[in-house]
Amino acid sequence: MYIIVVGAGKVGWNLTRELLEKGHEVTAIESNRRRYLMVEQELEHNISYGDASELWVLERAGIQRADMVIAVTGDDEDNMLICQVAREKYDVGQVIARVNNPRNREHFDLLGIKPVVSATDLILRLIEHEVPEYGLVHLLDLKEEQLEIIEMLLGQDSSVTGRRVGDLQMPEGSLLISVLRDGKGFVPGPDTVLEAGDEILAVLDPGREDELKVLFGPGGGNGAGADG
Amino acid sequence: MFILIVGCGRVGSSVARAMLREGHEVSCLDEDPESHARLEVGLEKGWEDLGGHFTVGAGLETDALVAAGIEKADAFIASTDGDNTNIVIAQIAQRRYEVPTVIARILDPLRAEWYQRQGVHTICPTRVAIDMLESAVREGAQREAI
């Protein structure tokens, strides 16, 4: 596969190296002269100097025959534009963009650029996973389908322990799909009684996390309060 | 007409003043608070006293665009010093906020030409300079030949 990597910072340089090791043909493009000269000592002809938002620089790097363009510069506008031009002008089959500021993600969506990779989001996911106190872990976002799957550990203080699943007032647009107990997973029925230490998986419409947190979290249980 | 100008440099501020004088409602958005002073160059009163609006913020920030009035804008001018920023925010204005008139200043002729063909109204000062220089040289050469 022929891959163009735009931006030879820490991410771009290492990515280029890895892709070369996997046997791909790769050209990295770097616009900072000093950085270029440094990286060029290792990558040699696999790096090209120039501002990749200039079309002729992309063409010189052979974008017409590229199978994939990966834009990982530190500038979101540049990444957006490069991916948009790659896809729409040069018919590159696959583009991947790095999002530096998670708040710009909506703009990538608007311009139809996907997939996007955001280090901030990835680290946040890791924190959610490694620090259980955080409550709720995103396992999967099905963006197109407008669904997500989350995992939650029920603490000792969870307001739903000892309660039947059938009695829970699950927020609209959410569904309890599985319970992990003592290392074993099962699909809960209405008569399943939840215990502290259970890990539950739920599928839900995006944006419903907070309601679930309230329902399954400590003390609160407001959502389930209407059980009278 | 309500006109939103993002990027209040020499170009943006001059267009802003001219549009305000013509009686339009003009709002400027710029990252640099100091650019407000440029708006008032040659004005007899303060920018706000004359009815102008000024917001500090980045053109890519949705909050800033909304605060500057993009939702009610009839015209949107992207004139920051970054070509790619202008291209991106012009498309945001067009696609997301459906502003009827959107114009982007793009210095790189190649990018300007391609995005123009993609339906983004672009103004390319570099192209204008190239054309003027070429015809000035041609005129000179012609005079020489006579």
Image (cartoon, coloured by chain):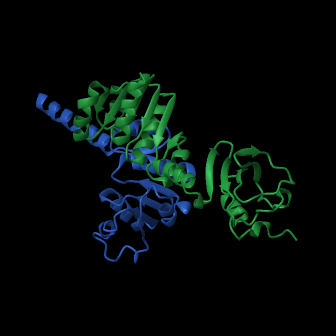
Residue A71 placement, left or right of A196: left
Q: Tell me what residue is drawn at x 36 percent, y 54 percent.
A: B80
User: x%, y% of residue A226?
Assistant: 83, 69
User: x%, y% of residue A50?
Assistant: 29, 35
Q: Foreground: A203 or A70?
A: A203
Q: Tell me what residue is drawn at x 42 percent, y 38 percent.
A: A71
Q: Tell me what residue is drawn at x 28 percent, y 24 percent.
A: A45
Q: Foreground: B137 or B96?
A: B96
Residue A212 placement, left or right of A123: right
Name the quadrant of the C terminus of chain B: top left
* Residue A135 placement: quadrant: bottom right
Q: Foreground: A136 or B82?
A: A136
The shade of chain B is blue
Q: Foreground: B23 or A35?
A: A35
User: x%, y% of residue A81?
Assistant: 43, 41
User: x%, y% of residue B28?
Assistant: 41, 64
Q: Residue furthest front?
A: A182
Residue A220 placement, left or right of A191: left
Residue A209 in view (yes/no): yes
The shade of chain A is green
Q: Tell me what residue is drawn at x 45 percent, y 68 percent.
A: B23
Residue B1 in view (yes/no): no
